């Protein structure tokens, strides 16, 4: 599991870096079989946070762009999106169902 590759793409594009260049940063490393994005609007994410945000989390405009770019990248790379704003049980159930469907169990 490597969330950093996908996160680097979403944040990098949001900071006006070239997608092609960002993709070269992990060249040669194994790629995921399945990528699941838990989609949560920045305002909801902020309301759930128990800690003061870091440099990126305090930049509301950046977070809005990251949110939009995750959706664009998910479409481009066939990442799966799950609504992460629901209960833990609902999100967990959807993740499990998606994984089971993917591995065909």
Image (cartoon, grey):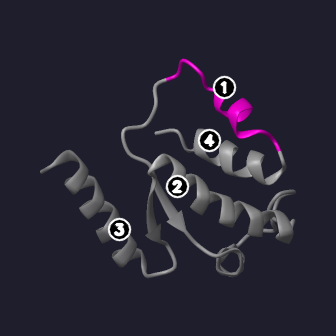
- First reached walking from the N terminus: tag 1 or tag 3: 1
Query: Magenta includes 22?
Result: yes
Q: Can you identify the residue that label 2 sits on?
A: 74
Q: How far apart are marks 2 and 1 (CA)?
A: 18 Å
Asked if residue 46 is positioned above or below residue 58 in the image, the reply reads: below
Of badges 4 and 2, nearer the viewer stands 2
Q: Residue at x 67, y 44 (%)?
A: 9
Q: In which quarter of the image is residue 95?
A: bottom left
* N-term mark: 4 or 1: 4
- Mark 3 falls on what kind of element? helix
Pinpoint residue 69: horizontal percent, then vertical percent: 67, 59
Residue that label 1 marks: 24
Q: What stretch is highlighted in magenta?
A: 17-29
Residue bearing the label numbered 3: 92
In this orientation, which residue lies closer to the viewer: 96 or 73? 73
* Element at label 4: helix
- Determine the CA span between mark 3 and mark 2: 20 Å
The residue carrying pointer 1 sits among few (fewer than 14), some (14 to 19) or many (20 or more) residues within 10 Å by Cα, namely: few
Q: Which residue does the numbered mark 4 point to in the structure image?
A: 4
């Amino acid at each position: 599991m490597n969330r950093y590759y996908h996160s680097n793409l979403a944040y990098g594009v949001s900071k006006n870096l070239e997608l092609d260049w960002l993709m070269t940063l992990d060249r040669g490393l194994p790629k995921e079989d399945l990528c699941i994005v838990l989609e949560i609007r920045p305002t909801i994410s902020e309301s759930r946070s128990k800690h003061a945000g870091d440099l990126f989390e305090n930049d509301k405009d950046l977070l809005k762009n990251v949110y939009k770019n995750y959706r664009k990248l998910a479409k481009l790379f066939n990442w799966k999106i799950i609504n992460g704003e629901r209960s833990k049980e609902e999100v967990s159930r959807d993740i499990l169902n998606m994984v089971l469907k993917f591995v065909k169990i």
